[in-house]
Image (spheres, grey):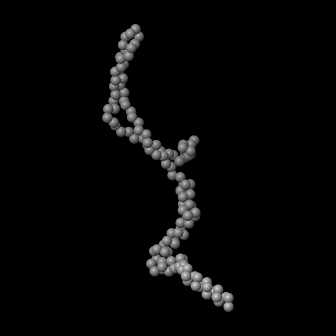
Amino acid sequence: LNCYGRSVAVKPACYVGVTKGAGGWVSAVQDLPGMNGALKRRELHGLRVRVRTGGYFSVFDLSRTMQAIVLGVVILELPAKLVLLFMLLCLGRLSSLYQDAIFRRFSLPSQVASLSARLLSSAS
């Protein structure tokens, strides 16, 4: 037996609430034509019921939870990124040393000067 594509072992719950509204008891009188032209009188009594639907349906799904954890840990490389952020932002003076080691500063004029010096020394 399945309920919303899931096994009944999951045991979904349904909650019903009842509130009293204004004018719940209803009565009416009807005069209807009967046999031989006589009028037939009907007295109707009842309870007015108004139904308001809404709500949500949710079930804890361990498979989707594990999928989200695996996505965060393996595919997005989340632990490595968190360690990198911690190293670069939270270690004070040591963070600036890590920044200098990880992100090498690049200066085009100094690179061109060193390249031309190497070319001149290898040509002679």
**As drawn, 41 above or below 79:** above
Instruction: Return the residue found at the far top.
Output: 36
Image spot of residue 68 (x, y percent): 54, 58
Which quadrant is home to the C terminus?
bottom right
**As drawn, 113 above or below 63:** below
Image spot of residue 47 (x, y percent): 36, 30
Q: How many marks?
A: 0
Instruction: Return the residue found at the far right.
Output: 123
Residue 101: tell me if it is visible: no
- Residue name at image x 51 percent, y 69 percent: 82
Which quadrant is home to the N terminus?
top right
Image spot of residue 31 (x, y percent): 35, 17
Q: In the image, 104: left or right of 15?
A: right
- Residue name at image x 48 percent, y 46 percent: 57
User: Within the image, what quadrant is residue 107 found in?
Assistant: bottom right
Instruction: Return the residue found at the far bottom.
Output: 124
- Residue name at image x 53 percent, y 56 percent: 65
Q: In the image, 76: left or right of 25?
A: right
**As drawn, 56 above or below 26:** below
**As drawn, 112 above or below 53:** below
Residue 45: tell me if it is visible: yes
- Residue name at image x 34 percent, y 21 percent: 29
